[in-house]
Amino acid sequence: DAVRIFHLATEEAWTSAVSVGTYTVSTLGLDLAEVGFIHCSQAPQVAGVHERFYRDVAEPLRLLTIDTDLLTSPWQLDPVEGEALPFPHIYGPLNVDAVVSAEPFTG
């Protein structure tokens, strides 16, 4: 079965990714090249990630829903210290056709 994972993106970063076909923002203000992977979340983790890292972001956000079966880069669940659930990380660019929805996100 396909697994759905999630990533919060700024409207600007997502629009830019759609035009080039790949998304390479790891997390707010950091690129894939700097971090080595793209941070994602399982469904129960989205609200906490938004609260911790994005609550002061004024620009519009999109919640990307990613179908892992469609990814062209490898991904895995990685344990994170102090977290009950492991976090999904994509180890390479996110191909935009693996994103099955990019809904506006308001938290």
Image (cartoon, rainbow, N blue to C red):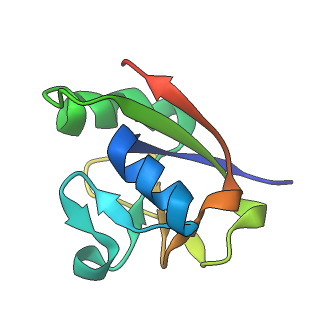
Residue at the top extreme?
A: 106
Q: With respect to residue 31, does 84 lie above or below?
A: above
Residue 19 visible in rendering? yes
**In the rendering, at what x and y percent does residue 99 appear?**
65, 51
Residue 11 lies in what quarter of the image? top left
**In the rendering, at what x and y percent does residue 85 appear?**
46, 47
Q: Position of 102 compared to 8: left or right?
A: right
Residue 95 lies in what quarter of the image? bottom right
The quadrant in which the C terminus is found is top left
- In the rendered picture of this protein, how many numbered marks are placed on residues? 0
**In the rendering, at what x and y percent does residue 73 appear?**
60, 78
Residue at the right extreme?
A: 1
Q: Foreground residue, 95 or 107?
A: 95
Residue at point 69%, 58% (across, down): 98
Residue 84 visible in rendering? no
Residue 21 lies in what quarter of the image? bottom right
Residue at the front extreme?
A: 19
**In the rendering, at what x and y percent does residue 106 appear?**
37, 18
Q: Position of 18 compared to 80: left or right?
A: right
Q: With respect to residue 30, does 85 lie above or below?
A: above
Q: Position of 33 compared to 96: left or right?
A: left
Residue at point 53%, 60% (across, down): 19
The quadrant in which the N terminus is found is bottom right
Q: Position of 103 compared to 17: left or right?
A: right
Residue at point 76%, 64% (across, down): 70
